[in-house]
Image: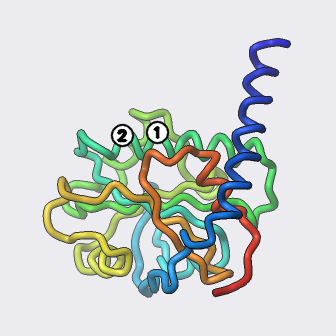
Amino acid sequence: MTPKAAATLVSATIFTLAQVWASQAQDWWLKTGPVPPHVELVDQDNKPRRFDELIRDRPVVVSFFFTGCQTVCPTQTAQLSLLQENVARQQLPLIARPLLLSISLDPYGDTPQSIREYAARFGVELGDEQNWLMLTGSFEDLRQVWRSFEQDAGNPVDHSALFWVGQPANKRWTRTDVTASPATLLALLTEKGDAQ
């Protein structure tokens, strides 16, 4: 067996095990999830985005970062990059493809340009076709998003190390540590379930 075939087999096995685990983890889903605010943010290309519209129908992972972060942000960005690769291999229909949203905690320092530079440092491809957007905006608009996702609006350095994993169409949300494997995240995002 070639190394590439072995890696594919291992990846498929981990994905299958993660799906089984996720299907047994019903208690992971929160009784009530965040209510996405109706605010306008901008993405890495300075394109206006209505936050609540982004999160309406597709499975989503919401994370919080800032471009000057030296602690957890590089880890979560690497995990999301691996998830992005796993999603691409699954060839899911658009409506089932998870959208990755990284929300800035530093509206004064995180400009669209600095966000693009941050993504480039990690070799991350952003945009609609890549199913990953990094968003910034005004302090007031971002604060509404932070509150909705129980994120401290004080010092960006003190931010949580959690991913919010959601299936908004099914009204299902959970939180998981940023070290959760991409296979586990994908299993949660694609788990079939009824609306809560």
Q: Position of residue 100 (x, y in %)?
A: 54, 58
Q: Position of residue 83 (x, y in %)?
A: 59, 46
Q: Is residue 127 left or right of residue 40?
A: right
Task: Please count the marks in the image.
Answer: 2
Q: In the picture, which quadrant includes the N terminus? A: top right
Residue 23 vertical position relative to residue 4 in the rendered view, above or below = below
Q: Position of residue 105 (x, y in %)?
A: 27, 62
Query: Residue tagged by mark 1?
Result: 78
Q: Is residue 107 left or right of residue 155?
A: right
Residue at position x 24%, y 64% in the image = 107
Q: Amino acid at mark 1?
A: Ala
Query: Residue tagged by mark 2?
Result: 74
Q: Quadrant of residue 108?
A: bottom left
Q: Residue furthest right?
A: 1
Residue at position x 68%, y 43% in the image = 86
Residue at position x 65%, y 54% in the image = 186
Q: Quadrant of residue 25?
A: bottom right
Mark 2 Cα within 10 Å, few/some/many (few <14, many 20+)?
A: some
Q: In the picture, which quadrant includes the C terminus? A: bottom right
Residue at position x 67%, y 81% in the image = 169
Tag 1, which secondary structure? helix
Tag 2, which secondary structure? helix
Q: Position of residue 57 (x, y in %)?
A: 66, 77
Q: Amino acid at mark 2?
A: Pro
Are circles 1 and 2 on residues that touch, CB within 8 Å?
yes
Q: Residue furthest top?
A: 2
